[in-house]
Amino acid sequence: MSTLVAIVFKHDEDGAEKALRKLRNLESEYLIDLEDAVIVHRREDGKVKLTQSVDLTSAGAWSGAFWGSLIGLIFTGPLGWLVVGGLGAGVGALAGASSDYGIDDDFIKDLSKEVEPCCSALFILIRRMTEDKVFDELGKIGGTVIKTSLSKDAEERLQTALQKQKPQAA
């Protein structure tokens, strides 16, 4: 079962990006396995901008191109794979762009009411993590938990780690 964690970084427009970079490094060390991540910014005009960490348009295009080319090669011969593969890439890109993967966008927008124009937020969906090590690393960045599906004890440990906000070495 996946775990949802939403952290707001008050007065830090780049806090969500820093946290996601940190989590990607931890992922390469096999300390966390992220399913999805979304960075949220509120623009000066009040609109919420979501930046997905998974590019579904390009993933859909590659998948569509592969399957279209394979089907085209099997059923229409050497020249048909180009036409059908190109069509498959277009259809795959459209399907990827219109699909919603992981965390529901409407849910994110609803919770993003706490994000001010000077702030950022990070929504992550976690498959698995080594809590103590991940919490320690996130504590170096700071932030405030606004929503989580962690246990009450784990949520308190995460919030405590985030409030410590150790200064980063330059």
Image: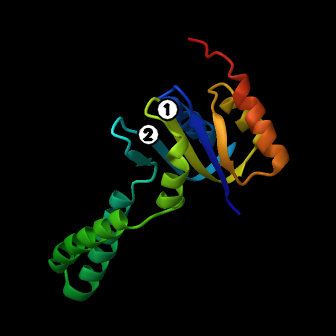
Any part of residue 30 in sight: no
Labels 1 & 2 near each other (Cβ < 8 A): yes
| Name of the residue lying farthest toward the top | 170
Q: Residue visible at 56% across and 30% down?
A: 10
Quadrant (top left/top right/bottom left/bottom right) for the N terminus: bottom right
- The kind of residue tagged 2 is His
Mark 2 closeness class: few <14, some 14–19, many ≥20 residues within 10 Å: many
Query: Mark 1 sits on what residue?
Result: 119
Q: Residue visible at 21% across and 77% down?
A: 84
C-alpha distance separating marks 1 and 2: 7 Å
Q: Position of residue 55 (x, y in %)?
A: 39, 54
Query: Mark 2 sits on what residue?
Result: 41
Any part of residue 89 in sight: yes
Q: Position of residue 92 (x, y in %)?
A: 31, 70
Q: Quadrant of residue 73?
A: bottom left
Report the disc number at residue 153. none
Element under disc 1: loop
